[in-house]
Amino acid sequence: MSNHARGLWGYSGKTASGLELTVQATGMGGPSAAVVLADLAKLGVRRAIRVGTCTGVPGLAELGELLLPTEAVAAVGSAASFGHAPGAAVPPDPELSGLLADALADEARMAPVASFDTLLGDPPSTPPAVVAADMQTVAVLSRGAALEMAVAAVLIVSRVEDELLADELLERASARAGKAAAKALSNPQVEG
């Protein structure tokens, strides 16, 4: 552990290729993630990938599936503090997102997601065309852009309606997503 700022665990080290890598918890929700991202930017971080969980929309996402957000659709609430009206779409950094897609090959699907300030309630409340929802992706992508950081995301569908992904499967999916994120961030093509 390299820090415990704001009560959130952070680890720093080097990738297999010798580049510095930080893994940082962000807490729950968009506002917390945005503050942590700003702290990381002050420390010199120029690229970030959100690795997290999401709730799948029944019939559109499968439990355990890895999703690469093509855009994050803002819902009501704190999205307004990032300058987004409900329904606005926030894209990831295209280059970093592409490298992440390459690192995951056919293990992940590109799809639009939504971000809410509360856990996803009933599926009819989700914006049209999204396959899943979380509480942070809009905030992370928006704040990253404002900080001139390259930011992308990979999400694990950990819940669909009342069905939850088993801890062992969530751990495996998290490890796979984390390795892909480290590989994408280690690519010398990415600025920063």
Image: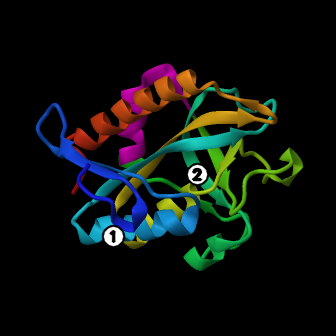
Crowd rating for badge 2 (residues with CA inside 10 Å; few <14, some 14–19, many 20+): many
Please tell me whether the stretch drawn in magenta is mainly helix, strand or loop: helix
29 in relation to 62, above or below? below
Q: Is residue 103 magenta?
A: yes
Give the x, y percent position of residue 20: 17, 47
Quarter of image, res 76 = bottom right
Question: What is the three-letter code of the residue carrying label 2?
Answer: Glu
Q: Which mark is residue 71?
A: 2
Give the x, y percent position of residue 96: 36, 46
User: Which stretch appears magenta?
Assistant: 96-109
- Camera-side residue of 90 and 23: 23
Position of residue 101 in the picture relative to residue 131 (left or right): left
Q: Is residue 145 magenta?
A: no
* SS label for mark 1: helix
Quarter of image, res 36 = bottom left
Question: What is the three-letter code of the residue carrying label 1?
Answer: Asp
Crowd rating for badge 1 (residues with CA inside 10 Å; few <14, some 14–19, many 20+): few
The quarter of the picture where the C terminus appears is bottom left
Give the x, y percent position of residue 14: 16, 41
Position of residue 111 in the picture relative to residue 21 (left or right): right
- Tell me what residue is drawn at x 88 percent, y 49 percent: 124
126 in relation to 148, above or below? above
- Tell me what residue is drawn at x 61 percent, y 26 percent: 64
Q: Which residue is mark 1?
A: 39
Q: Which mark is residue 148?
A: none
Residue 129 shows up from this direction? yes
- Tell me what residue is drawn at x 22 percent, y 44 percent: 189
Residue 142 shows up from this direction? no
- Camera-side residue of 75 and 64: 64
